Amino acid sequence: RIQIGAPRGSNPAHGNENTGVVFRCGIKSSCYNVNMKPFDGNSDTYAAESYFGNSMDISEDKSIFAACGHRWVQVSGFDYWMQGACFAGKTNENTTEFFNSLYRLNPQTVVVTGVRVYNLAIAQMGFSAQFVKDTKKNDLMIGLPGLLNWKGGVGLLSKGERPPAARRRRRRSIDDIRETFIPDVA
């Protein structure tokens, strides 16, 4: 099988908004949409033009895939925060789980010398995505170019041991995947 990302694609299940679509195709069979459902009618999110399928990867052992959309938006009051989001799913199933912890973390913005700057609000999680090679845990590194007012950083979706408590954020997950966000300190 092959997986194809169509970041500007539309899916009738999502109201034909151009959310992005991931297709799974057999070599000798037709293609179908992978079931990606962050769009649960939550009025606090904006999924159109999310670019899901823009960055994708499959784990080294071929058991888990990830697809991200760095333009997924979380609405907060009058603010539209382009935080991004990712899906992870087993390659032999047509279900996925949705990951975006950024809107649950605080502060979204901070005041630095009297000026409000973005902390997590425009991180664009999932701008890039790659499973870490040579690990048995299927760790997924994700790009966060807008983190800390465009300083940028990386995120880690990790299966296995919990990260240190200061960085830990527990989420429902496939095979106990955990999220950790690491700012670029260089």
Image (cartoon, helix red, strand yellow):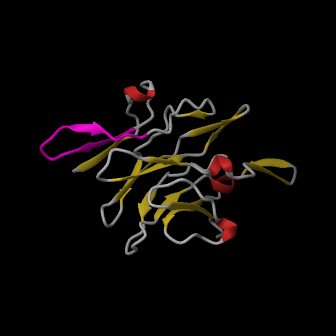
Q: Is residue 100 left or right of residue 86?
A: right
Say which residue appears at 29% left-offset and 52% top-offset: 92
As drawn, 178 above or below 136: above
As drawn, 18 above or below 70: above
Image location (x, y in percent) of residue 12: 38, 26
As drawn, 96 above or below 44: below
In the rendered image, which quarter contains the C terminus? bottom right
Dividing the picture into quarters, in which one does residue 8 lie? top left
Say which residue appears at 27% left-offset and 44% top-offset: 24
Image location (x, y in percent) of residue 150: 64, 54
Say which residue appears at 52% left-offset and 47% top-offset: 85
Was residue 25 drawn as part of the magenta stretch in this picture? yes
Was residue 178 drawn as part of the magenta stretch in this picture? no
Dividing the picture into quarters, in which one does residue 163 lie? bottom right
* In the foreground, 110 or 33: 33
Q: Is residue 40 left or right of residue 62?
A: right
Q: Is residue 48 left or right of residue 147?
A: left
* In the foreground, 146 or 72: 72
How many labels were placed on the picture?
0
Outermost residue on the left side: it is: 28
Q: Is residue 6 left or right of residue 104?
A: left
Image location (x, y in percent) of residue 47: 52, 34
Specify the segment rendered in magenta.
21-36
Image location (x, y in percent) of residue 54: 41, 46
